[in-house]
Image (cartoon, rainbow, N blue to C red):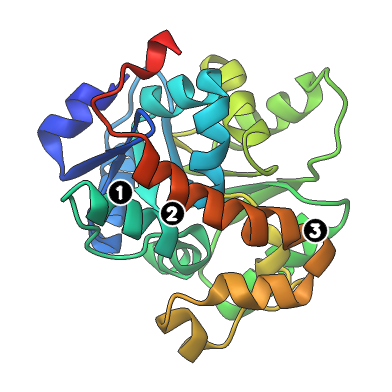
């Protein structure tokens, strides 16, 4: 397992609220995934993304923060994290998020398994992606509303042995699920991707490209689902910025 200290030695890193994450580029992230796929290991690599909402959760949920620090790769997603990293004098090279990464993974030729979303969403994402990328191998799908006993799901994943298992259950549920079942899984990479399958299936449209370039996709999400996203963005974003200013990184987070 790659620890945060090992990641720090290998790549450019930032640390916010006691959580260490990469400040590298999308290409560096893709290269890391390709390396895990090419070199089998006793455990699948555990990779995920953090945005301002994730770091707000980690601020008060130290078990989640510790779990992120045990992941093999944690990438910076969104303008809030970029501001936080800049405030620590460790600027982010590029916004690395799962929705932009997915087409690049499809083009890279890795086999995938789609886990998560409401019933029917993963299947719809599979159909849409396979139509767009005829050479793509999506070996299986499973919705995210299964019971605590996931033996049947794990057996299906293991029988199909994908290169990359995309786990789309929302934070922090998806990260805890990966950590709990990682030793049972026959895949090369477990990638936690939040609401990715909703976008990949077309159930939720993405923001226009010009707005994404301006780092304003969160505004589009707020417009799409104001009730659901109000607390996350209207309350959560200012709280996140205040916490960046209020809490220095030399604080001993594990004693709080």
Residue at position x 33%, y 46% in the image: 33
Question: Of helix, strand and loop, which one carries label 1?
Answer: helix
Pointer 3: what residue? 228
Pointer 1: what residue? 34
Q: Position of residue 179 (x, y in %)?
A: 54, 21
Q: Are marks 2 and 3 in contact (CB under 8 Å)?
A: no
| Of labels 3 and 1, the one closer to you | 3
Q: Position of residue 191 (x, y in %)?
A: 50, 42
Q: Can residue 138 be seen in this snapshot?
A: yes
Q: Can residue 78 be seen in this snapshot?
A: no
Residue at position x 54%, y 56% in the image: 238
Distance of mark 2 from mark 3, alpha carbons?
A: 34 Å
Left or right? Give the position of 44 relative to 126: left
| Of labels 2 and 3, the one closer to you | 3
Left or right? Give the position of 22 relative to 155: left
Residue 167, quarter of picture: top right
Instruction: Name which of mark 3 and mark 1 comes first in the sequence.
Output: 1
Instruction: Name which of mark 2 and mark 3 comes first in the sequence.
Output: 2
Left or right? Give the position of 171 relative to 227: left
Given residues 10 and 16, the one toward you in this image is 16
Residue 156, quarter of picture: top right
Pointer 2: what residue? 110
Q: Are marks 2 and 1 in contact (CB under 8 Å)?
A: yes
Residue at position x 47%, y 90% in the image: 210
């Amino acid at each position: 397992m790659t620890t945060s200290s090992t990641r720090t030695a290998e790549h450019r890193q930032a640390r916010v609220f006691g959580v260490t994450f990469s400040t590298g580029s999308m290409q560096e992230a893709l290269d890391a995934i390709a390396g895990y796929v090419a070199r089998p290991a006793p455990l699948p690599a555990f990779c995920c993304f953090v945005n301002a909402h994730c770091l707000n959760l980690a601020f008060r949920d130290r078990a989640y923060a510790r779990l992120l620090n045990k992941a093999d790769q944690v990438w910076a997603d969104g303008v809030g994290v970029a501001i936080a990293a800049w405030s620590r004098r460790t600027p982010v090279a590029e916004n690395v998020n799962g929705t932009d990464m997915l087409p690049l993974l499809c083009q890279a030729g890795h086999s995938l398994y789609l886990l998560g979303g409401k019933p029917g969403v993963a299947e719809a994402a599979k159909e849409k992606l396979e139509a767009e990328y005829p050479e793509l191998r999506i070996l299986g799908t499973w919705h995210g509303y299964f019971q605590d006993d996931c033996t049947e799901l794990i057996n299906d994943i293991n029988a199909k042995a994908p290169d990359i298992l995309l786990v789309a259950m929302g934070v922090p549920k998806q990260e805890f699920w990966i950590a709990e079942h990682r030793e049972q899984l026959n895949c090369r990479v477990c990638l936690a991707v939040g609401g990715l399958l909703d976008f990949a299936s077309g159930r939720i449209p993405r923001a226009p490209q010009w707005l994404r370039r301006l780092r304003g996709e969160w505004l589009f999400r707020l417009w799409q689902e104001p009730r659901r996203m109000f607390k996350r963005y209207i309350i959560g974003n200012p709280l996140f910025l205040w916490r960046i200013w209020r809490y220095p990184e030399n604080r001993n987070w594990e004693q709080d």
